[in-house]
Amino acid sequence: MKNIFQQHQVFFIFLTKFLLSYFIVTILYSFYLDQYHTQKNEVDGITHFVAEQTKNSLIFFDANCEIIKHEFEPSYKIIYNSKYIARIVEGCNSISVIILFISFIFAFSNRYIPTFSFIFFGALLIFILNIFRIALLTVGLYNYPEYGTFLHDILFPLIIYGVVFVLWVVWVLKFSAYAKEKK
């Protein structure tokens, strides 16, 4: 009789690769964040970029929007039509979602070029969609403030995680080591 590891070797390899890549990328991102002093309300560069691109997206669609550094916390205020609507904090920059995405793709990888290409284009798609998510959330919060919790906590996370899930499915079925074995 085979031992548990031999019976479920594919699962354990997946789990090891997933956890190892998640740990490594999270540590690297943590080192990046450590250069910013949140006690002094410093906002990391990625979050700043997301805030600026959110503003630019709204302005592109002829909206009146400003991004102002928050005076009491490491975040940016979104001022939409002269009204403070929301704030963008480090958790809004989609990096944690991208780390999860990268770890899953890597866990199902078997070749470098397709894996890194899919990671690059998938992460870029998630990053861009996140900027539009924040812009649409801003408009939604402005027009429908009574649905703020639903929009922020349910609808827009469902959209971003839904896209990540679809990318995972495409990867597993079309490009991963598993897809190659099925053919």
Image (cartoon, helix red, strand yellow):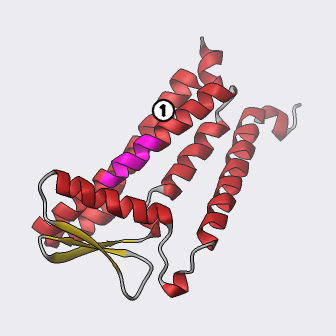
Q: Estimate the x, y position of residue 153 in percent, counting from the top left.
A: 33, 65
Q: Is residue 42 above or below residue 144?
A: below
**Residue 64: where, in percent of width, then height?**
13, 65
Above or below — where is 173 with respect to 131? above
- Location of residue 78 in the rendering, given as x and y in whole percent from the top left corner: 26, 71
Q: Is residue 78 magenta?
A: no
User: Main SS of the magenta segment?
Assistant: helix
Hey, which quadrant is residue 1 in on the image?
A: top right
In percent of width and height, residue 161 lies at 41, 49
Magenta residue span: 124-131
Q: Determine whether 126 is above or below 95 in the image.
A: above
Residue drawn at x 79%, y 33% as measured from the top left: 7
Q: Nearer the viewer, residue 31 or 45?
A: 45
User: Label 1, on which residue?
Assistant: 169
Instruction: Tell me the element at label 1.
Output: helix
Residue sitting at x 47%, y 29%: 170
Report how many numbered discs are placed on residues in the image: 1
The residue at the point 60 percent across, 26 percent down is 114
Looking at the image, is 18 positioned above or below residue 173?
Answer: below
> What type is the residue that disc 1 sits on?
Val
**Residue 130 shown in magenta:** yes
